[in-house]
Amino acid sequence: MEQIESPASRPRLVTPVTLGHVDALPDGPHAAAALARTLDQFDGRRDLDEIARDEPALPRALLDELVGTLDEAGLIDDDAPVASRAGAEVILEIEDLVEQYCEETLYRNPFWRACLDTRSPGDLPERLAIGMVIENWHFLFRESYFDAPVLSYVPSTPVRLTLNRFFSEEYGHDEILLRALNFAGLSRADMLDAIPLPETMGLCNALAYWSHSDPLFFFTTLGLLEGQGMQHDSFIQACERAQLPDGLVGPLKTHATINLNAAHGSLTRAIFHDVPVLDAATVARMKAQLRLFVELYDDFYTAVWHYYTSDAPLLRRVSDL
């Protein structure tokens, strides 16, 4: 457990104090000069033990009395230091938690098991692959729902610039996937008439909520969403091993290459590198929400598997309601 020092151990004056404010000065010019230097050192950066060692002309008892008197007069800042850690350190810890939760859920769901188990044609149904592209298109088409709220992120200019650069690179990626859907016989009009699976919309809505209400936590989700640490896309590799048509797989590879070359998988680390400190309460709040996010992401892929391996219509159309 982190220990927090009392305010008096590293005294910080809330306003400058000079010898003219002191009623009874210590005897001798050297002691008075030492007292003046001591008052200048009450800036919250040094503790009393250090100050006492540097000013042997002033007894420690006198220093304690001085700080006590100043504190009673309301001249010592009583706000205790906040326990904090660097954002670059915290995000590594969060990544470990995300990986742990993914091992328990996402990496075991039927969609990803099917991708990893694909070895030859027929192992990965083409309808399932098309369904994955359909839901991914729905997700990217609605990306502004959850990216736009953080583009004006006020607390950090470097973070804001990183986010705007990312959004400009992401803009229009749904159009790349639309080319794959066109090959599968689906037009733009078809997709605009289509309804995403509830789990797809649920993930979009959750991200939009976090983006509006808790931007720092939203930033932690981007690593998993953008394939952090991945040099290859398991879904695309499965499509290639299943020898699915290049007209379907080609646009997916184009999209993945753009993300890889733009280092989108490192986006979260880049953001938190520019977050100098995070207090303990913020870190705890972010960690507490991670499992829910991973479960929503797991639900997304599981729903893709269940719906697109069934006999249900390929598109859930508004016009059919």
Image (tube, rainbow, N blue to C red):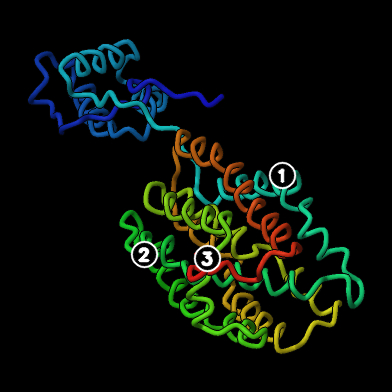
Q: Residue at x 19, y 31 (%)?
A: 14
- Callout 2 secondary element: loop
Residue 65 got which mark? none
Image coordinates of residue 43 in percent, x first then y, are 28, 34
| Cα separation between marks 3 and 2 | 27 Å
**Residue that numbered label 3 is attached to:** 195
**Residue that numbered label 1 is attached to:** 100
Of the residues shown, which amino acid type is indicated by label 2? Leu
- Callout 1 secondary element: helix
Of the residues shown, which amino acid type is indicated by label 3? Ile
Q: Quick one: label 1, few (<14), some, or many (20+) residues within 10 Å?
A: few
Q: Earlier in the sequence, mark 1 or mark 2?
A: 1
Of the residues shown, which amino acid type is indicated by label 1? Gln
Image coordinates of residue 309 in percent, x first then y, are 76, 63
Q: Quick one: label 2, few (<14), some, or many (20+) residues within 10 Å?
A: some
Q: Residue at x 65, y 48 (%)?
A: 98
Reply above or below: 82 against 247. Answer: above
The N terminus sits in image quarter: top right
Reply above or below: 116 against 47. Answer: below
Reply above or below: 162 against 202. Answer: below
Toward the right, the furthest residue is 120
**Residue that numbered label 2 is attached to:** 151
Camera-nearest label, 1 or 3: 3
Image coordinates of residue 219 in percent, x first then y, are 49, 55
Reply above or below: 34 against 196. Answer: above
Q: Earlier in the sequence, mark 3 or mark 2?
A: 2
